[in-house]
Amino acid sequence: MNELVVMKDKQAVTTSLQVAENFEKRHDHLLRDIETLKDDVPNFGEMYFLSTTHDSYGRDRKHYLMNRDGFTLLAMGFTGKKAMEFKLKYIQAFNDMESHIKQELDTTALSPELQMFNAIFKTVAKQELATKQLENKIDSISEIVALNTTDWRKDSTNLINKIARVMGNTVGAHREVRNNIFQEVDRRAGTQLNTRLTNKRRRMADEGVAKSKRDKLTKVDVIVDDKKLVEIYVAIVKEYAISYGVYKEMAENGI
C-alpha cells in the first residue's frame, strides 16, 4: 500500500510530517496552518487528530493525522506543478487505502476451520470483485475518453465539476481545477489565454458590444475560437478526470 497514506483506527489518514516533507514546507508552518482552521471549521476534530512521535533524540514531536477531507482542505492552497503532482498521488493513495479498508474483514473470532473457508471465500470474492471493478473502470474511463469536440463545452464542465467534487466540492476547488487546466493549456499550446481574453474584450468593445456582456467572457470563450486550443483543452480535461479518479465516482454512482 502507498506509504503516503496509512490505516489508523480503520480510517485512511496521512500525517502533517509526511505532507510537509512531500510538499517541501516547514512543518511548524504547516502546524500553524492546520491550527488556524480550528476557528473556521466546525468539524475540525473529525478531520484532524493531534498525535506525537519521537524524533532522533527520543523527544516527543507534535504532529497531526488527517483524513481525506482534512488533507483536501489543507492542500487546497498548495500551488505549482510539483504540488499538483503530489496532490494527485495523495488522492490516488487515499482511494487505494479506502478501497483496501472496505475489503478488510475481522476474522480473529472465527474458528480455524471457518477462517480457512473464509480465506478461500475472500480469495474468490476478491477475484470477482477485481473483475467487476475493472469492468466498471473501463466503462467509466471509456465514457470520459469518449468526450469529443462536438459537445465539448458542456461535457467538459460536467467533468470539471466532478473533479472539484472529488477535491471537496468547494468554490476554491472549482477555481483551482479550472486555473490549473488553463495553465496547462497555456503551457502545451505556447499561448497566453489571459492576453487573448483581454484582446477579445477590446475587439468587442470596438464593435460596440455592451460591457456587461464583455465582462461575462471567460477563457473558455477564447478557447472556442481556436480549434487547436479546443482539442488541447478537451485532452487536458480528460487527463485530469482520470487522474482524480472521477471514473470511480461515475462507476459507483452509475453516472
Image: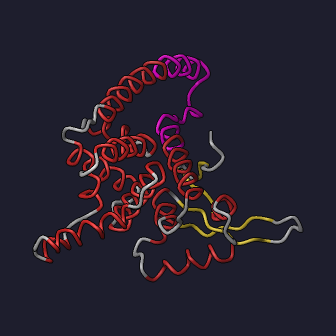
Q: Which residue appears at 55% of the width and 32% of the height? A: 107
Residue lying at the far front in this picture: please name it: 206
In the rendering, at what x and y percent does residue 130 appear? 46, 24
Figure label count: 0
Q: Nearer the viewer, residue 249 or 216?
A: 216
Horizontal side of 95 relative to 220 (left or right) equals right
Q: Is residue 253 magenta?
A: no
Horizontal side of 224 relative to 193 (left or right) equals left
Residue lying at the far right in this picture: please name it: 57
Quarter in which the N terminus is drawn: top right
Horizontal side of 38 relative to 238 (left or right) equals right
**Rendering quarter of residue 164:** bottom left
In the rendering, at what x and y percent does residue 73 appear? 46, 66
User: What secondary structure is the magenta-colored segment mainly?
Assistant: helix
Q: Is residue 170 above or below residue 88?
A: below
**Rendering quarter of residue 219:** bottom left
Range of the magenta residues? 97-125
Q: Nearer the viewer, residue 36 or 83?
A: 83
Q: Is residue 119 magenta?
A: yes
In the rendering, at what x and y percent does residue 25 appear? 66, 69
Q: Nearer the viewer, residue 168 or 88?
A: 88
